[in-house]
Image (cartoon, helix red, strand yellow):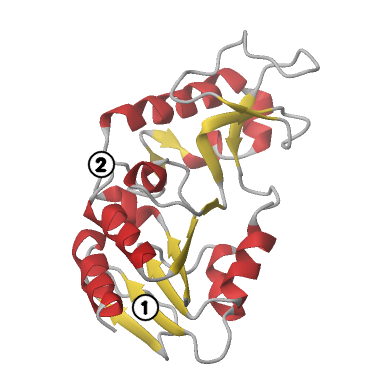
């Protein structure tokens, strides 16, 4: 059975109503990105940062997986499929995908500010000052912020090295280290890029499907299931 790796970015979740990271003027849901996406900001104003991610977590209860998420599960009928996502939502899980690597963390989890391996499942609940780690310190969102290492990148590299087919959906291919994963695929790996906007990245050897995820994913899935 061939191996498929699917790399997804904000574009696949945008159709479910989740705002992309840089929708307009450097704002993310009316917050300045630099105020909510690094550890220094959390140390400076943990109430603001925690509130932001609590709002994002609550938003998950009002959105559903779209056709793009759902179509990917069909590939598991014929292939070994691993989803490598830059998204922190749980829409791939809710759509039914079984093997998912979250590069940038997960909204439905919290962790110790001193030990990111100390992880707590919180579902859709807010993080409050009463939620503390083993040291008695308030938990932080389980999110990889700017300047922090990406713990799951090595695992993602390993699955990309074994990929026979790589499908990239809804990402600009300019955010590293995720964008570099394409460089780890073996010779002969068949590659697809699904996005309504043509990226600035070099597309040599890549089958570019210029469609939004809900349409483009179905196109590629049908092709691969009939191959």
- Using a 10 Å C-alpha cutoff, classify the residue at mark 1 as few (fewer than 14 neighbours), some (14 to 19) or many (20 or more): many
Q: Under tag 2, what secondary structure? A: loop
Question: Residue at left 50%, top 91%?
Answer: 188
Q: Is residue 106 above or below residue 180?
A: above
The residue located at (31%, 41%) in the rendering is 18
Most distant residue in the top direction: 130
Q: Residues within 10 Å of mark 2 (few under 14, many from 20)?
A: some
Query: Which residue shows up at 39% across the image and 50% down it?
Result: 22
Q: Position of residue 210 (x, y in %)?
A: 24, 74
Task: Locate the C terminus by quadrant.
Answer: bottom left
Residue situated furthest right in the rendering: 135
- State which quadrant residue 220 falls in: bottom left
Dot label at residue 192: 1
Confirm or deny contact between disc 1 and disc 2 (CB under 8 A). Answer: no
User: What residue is disc 2 on?
Assistant: 17
Q: Is residue 159 above or below residue 164?
A: above
**Residue 180's x, y, as percent?**
58, 72
Q: In whole angstroms, how far apart are the C-alphas of marks 1 and 2?
A: 24 Å
Left or right, 96 with reference to 129 = left
Foreground mark, 1 or 2, reads 1
Question: For the residue labelled by badge 1, is the local secondary structure a helix, a strand or a loop?
Answer: strand
Percent across and percent down for residue 176 are 58, 64
Whether residue 157 sits left or right of residue 48 in the image: it is: right
Residue 178's disc number: none
Is residue 196 in view? no
Decide which of tag 1 and tag 2 comes sooner along the chain: 2
Measured from the top left, where is residue 12 in percent x and y?
A: 32, 55
Does residue 140 appear to the left or right of 126 in the view shown?
A: right
Q: Quadrant of residue 41?
A: top right
């Amino acid at each position: 059975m061939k191996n498929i790796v699917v790399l997804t970015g904000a574009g696949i979740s945008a159709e479910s109503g989740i705002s992309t990271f840089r929708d307009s003027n450097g704002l993310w849901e009316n917050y300045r990105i630099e105020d909510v996406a690094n550890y220094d900001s959390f140390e400076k104003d943990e109430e603001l940062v925690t509130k932001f991610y609590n709002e994002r977590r609550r938003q998950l209860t009002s959105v559903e997986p779209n056709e793009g998420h759902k179509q990917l599960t069909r590939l598991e009928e014929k292939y070994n499929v691993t989803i490598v996502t830059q998204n922190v939502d749980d829409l791939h899980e809710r759509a039914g995908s079984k093997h998912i690597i979250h590069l940038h963390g997960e909204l439905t989890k919290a962790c110790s500010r001193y030990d990111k391996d100390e992880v707590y499942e919180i579902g859709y609940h807010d993080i409050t000052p009463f939620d503390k780690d083993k040291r008695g310190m308030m938990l932080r969102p389980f999110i990889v912020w700017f300047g922090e290492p990406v713990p799951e990148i090595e695992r993602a590299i390993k699955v990309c090295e074994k990929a026979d087919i790589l499908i990239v959906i809804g990402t600009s291919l300019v955010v590293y280290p995720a964008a570099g994963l394409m460089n780890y695929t073996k010779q002969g790996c068949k590659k697809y890029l699904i996005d309504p906007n043509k990226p600035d990245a070099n597309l040599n050897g890549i089958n570019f499907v210029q469609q939004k995820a809900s349409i483009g994913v179905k196109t590629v899935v049908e092709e691969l299931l009939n191959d």
